[in-house]
Image (spheres, rainbow, N blue to C red):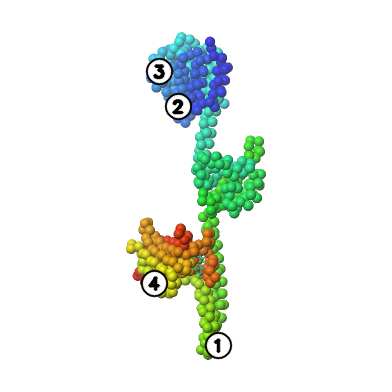
């Protein structure tokens, strides 16, 4: 019994979505065709327009050698080549006698009747659908009509499948582009919940990109606490469809403390009916630009401060000079019965002068004179100077340890001594008794010298901005010592960090790069 032709045509048409590949779909369709026409052999040729050739993508009832013979055909070559050129079916009662046959296999395989129809859809030819049989029969007019109907269904399916596969490939390409982009790209639903995040965002949050679905995030929870209020104000507007371009916002990063700066642009997402479904956001990391802006601002503030310091110093130092001179005159004249009072006056005037000097030094640092320095000698001499200069109280000790293989540093030795003096002074001021360790060593990279000052004092207050100018916890302090230190270290291309020691006390670590000496530098120095 013949299969119902309409059902067969339908089953071909329905096939598309069910099959993973075009070949699988064609193979299924060919099976249906052969069943409907009750014939044992057939095949589908697809046209490769670029190469101008046909290839037999699926076939039934052909021997291996016949397949190799039929495998590829040029346009116009053989029977299928002609069908594609003319878009007209070819029906042959007996292949053996047909002069159009170019390939021998048809004869050696014993095929007799043959029919080939073009696979067409939307005025475009995709290939041919062929049937042949070894049985002595003729493909009738109704057979060919049925074949043509099925061929047009298959042609449509080929067109759709290609479209679908093309879309899928393009979707994969774009997905790759989005997933691997360095910018953060994410989609939200209408409530601002993140429903898709690319790898960059997952990385920022320190999460596995595949596990993001398990713990859904909201835009607000992604935002740094300091920017959350502003985001909470903007978010409802964004979710109502308002586009906001290049909004600067901090998002939390994996360590969550500082966050990173981003410039974010959002666009609304809509469904086919135009209703809002959420938004799409792209955020570009601008942390380094913001840092640079901050540094420029800081430099400007320092320059202003420098000008102000110079004028204040001038205003203070002139009357101060007059005061000191007057004290001298009063002393010599024996003008008071209480000379101790004059001593206090002199000491306080001297202290004022020191403060003004430090202030000036901070605001207008002297030019740097780098020369090759022996770090070991420099550290030893700074320690000796500190001891001699009375920086240590009776109950405090100072231990010095220097690596034997310290490289030569190109630096301003006076400035480095100032760094060490300030660090030692702070260490000593932080404790009533105990030990300060001063050490210098070469790091394994061979390009860095590390100098450490560690004390057993009261340690640093959590989060205190100790390197900021004027930050002080001391009644008599200016709060300029560490900011001068930090600037000298930065001028030498180095870094400084401050931490608390696990057992109490604090530890300051200075790292200086070993730079090449300038060509005109004088000889090496260490001792004063
Ligand atoms: N070794 C240390 N241990 C504990 N706290 C420290 C230490 N060094 C610095 N600090 C803290 O950092 C602050 C700033 O230090 P900085 O040297 O800049 O100024 P200062 O010592 O207060 O004043 P000045 O150096 O002008 O005398 C100090 O007031 C102190 O609170
Ligand atoms: Mg200090």
Horizontally, residue 418 falls left or right of residue 6, namely: left
Which circle, 1 or 3, is nearer the viewer?
A: 1
Of 248 and 374, nearer the camera is: 374
Outermost residue toward the left? Answer: 404
Badge 3: how crowded within 10 Å, few (<14), some, or many (20+)?
few
Which circle, 3 or 4, is nearer the viewer?
A: 4
Badge 1: how crowded within 10 Å, few (<14), some, or many (20+)?
few
Cα distance in 3D space between marks 3 and 4: 99 Å
Outermost residue toward the bottom? Answer: 333
Of the image marks 1 and 2, the number of the one nearer the N terminus? 2
Residue at the disc numbered 2? 53
Q: What residue do we see at 56% from left, 23% from top?
A: 14
Cα distance in 3D space between marks 4 and 1: 40 Å
Element at badge 1? loop
Residue 99's quadrant in the figure? top left
Which circle, 1 or 2, is nearer the viewer?
A: 1
Badge 2: how crowded within 10 Å, few (<14), some, or many (20+)?
some
Residue at the disc numbered 4? 384
Whether residue 370 is visible, yes or no, is no
Which circle, 4 or 1, is nearer the viewer?
A: 1
Residue at the disc numbered 1? 336
Which circle, 4 or 2, is nearer the viewer?
A: 4
Residue at the disc numbered 3? 63
Outermost residue toward the top? Answer: 136
Element at badge 2? strand
Q: What residue do we see at 57% from left, 77% from top?
A: 315
Of 469 and 368, nearer the camera is: 469
Q: Are marks 1 and 3 in contact (CB under 8 Å)?
A: no
């Amino acid at each position: 019994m013949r299969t119902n032709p309409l059902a067969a045509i339908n089953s071909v048409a329905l096939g598309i979505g069910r099959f993973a590949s075009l070949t699988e779909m064609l193979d299924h369709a060919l099976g249906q065709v052969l069943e409907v026409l009750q014939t044992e052999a057939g095949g589908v040729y697809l046209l490769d327009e670029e190469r101008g050739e046909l290839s037999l993508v699926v076939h039934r009832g052909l021997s291996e050698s016949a397949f190799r013979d039929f495998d590829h055909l040029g346009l116009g070559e053989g029977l299928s080549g002609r069908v594609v050129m003319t878009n007209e079916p070819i029906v042959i009662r007996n292949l053996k006698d047909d002069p159009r046959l170019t390939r021998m296999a048809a004869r050696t395989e014993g095929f007799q009747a043959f029919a080939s129809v073009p696979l067409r859809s939307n005025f475009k030819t995709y290939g041919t659908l062929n049937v042949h049989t070894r049985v002595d029969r003729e493909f009738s007019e109704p057979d060919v009509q049925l074949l043509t109907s099925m061929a047009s269904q298959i042609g449509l399916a080929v067109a759709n499948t290609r479209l679908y596969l093309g879309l899928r490939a393009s979707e994969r390409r774009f997905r790759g582009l989005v997933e691997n982009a360095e910018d953060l790209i994410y989609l939200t639903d209408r409530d601002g919940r993140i429903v898709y995040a690319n790898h960059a965002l997952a990385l920022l949050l320190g999460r596995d990109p595949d596990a993001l679905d398990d713990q859904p995030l909201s835009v607000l929870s992604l935002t740094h606490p300091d920017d959350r209020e502003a985001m909470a104000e903007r978010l409802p507007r964004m979710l109502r469809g308002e586009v906001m371009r290049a909004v600067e916002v901090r998002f939390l990063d994996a360590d969550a403390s500082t966050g990173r700066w981003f410039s974010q642009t959002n666009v609304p997402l809509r469904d086919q009916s135009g209703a809002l479904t959420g938004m799409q956001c792209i955020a570009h990391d601008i942390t380094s630009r913001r840092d640079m802006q901050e540094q420029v601002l800081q430099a400007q503030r320092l320059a202003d401060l420098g000008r102000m310091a110079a004028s204040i110093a001038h205003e203070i130092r002139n009357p101060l000079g007059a005061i000191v001179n007057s004290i001298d005159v009063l002393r010599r004249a024996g003008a008071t019965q209480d000379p101790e009072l004059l001593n206090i006056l002199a000491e306080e005037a001297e202290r004022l002068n020191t403060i003004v000097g430090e202030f000036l030094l901070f605001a207008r640092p002297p030019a740097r004179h780098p020369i090759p320095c022996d770090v070991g000698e420099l550290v030893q001499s700074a320690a000796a100077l500190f001891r001699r200069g009375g920086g240590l109280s009776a109950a405090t000790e100072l231990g010095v340890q220097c690596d034997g293989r310290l490289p030569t540093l190109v630096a301003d030795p006076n400035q480095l001594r100032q760094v060490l003096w300030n660090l030692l002074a702070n260490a000593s001021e932080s404790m009533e008794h105990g030990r300060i360790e001063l050490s210098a060593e070469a790091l394994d990279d061979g390009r860095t010298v590390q100098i450490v000052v560690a004390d057993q004092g009261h340690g640093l207050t959590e989060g205190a901005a100790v390197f900021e100018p004027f930050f002080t916890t001391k009644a008599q302090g200016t709060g300029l010592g560490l900011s001068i230190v930090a600037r000298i270290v930065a001028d030498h291309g180095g870094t400084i960090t401050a931490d608390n020691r696990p057992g109490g006390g604090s530890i300051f670590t200075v790292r200086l790069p070993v730079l090449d000496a300038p060509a005109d530098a004088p000889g090496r120095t260490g001792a004063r």
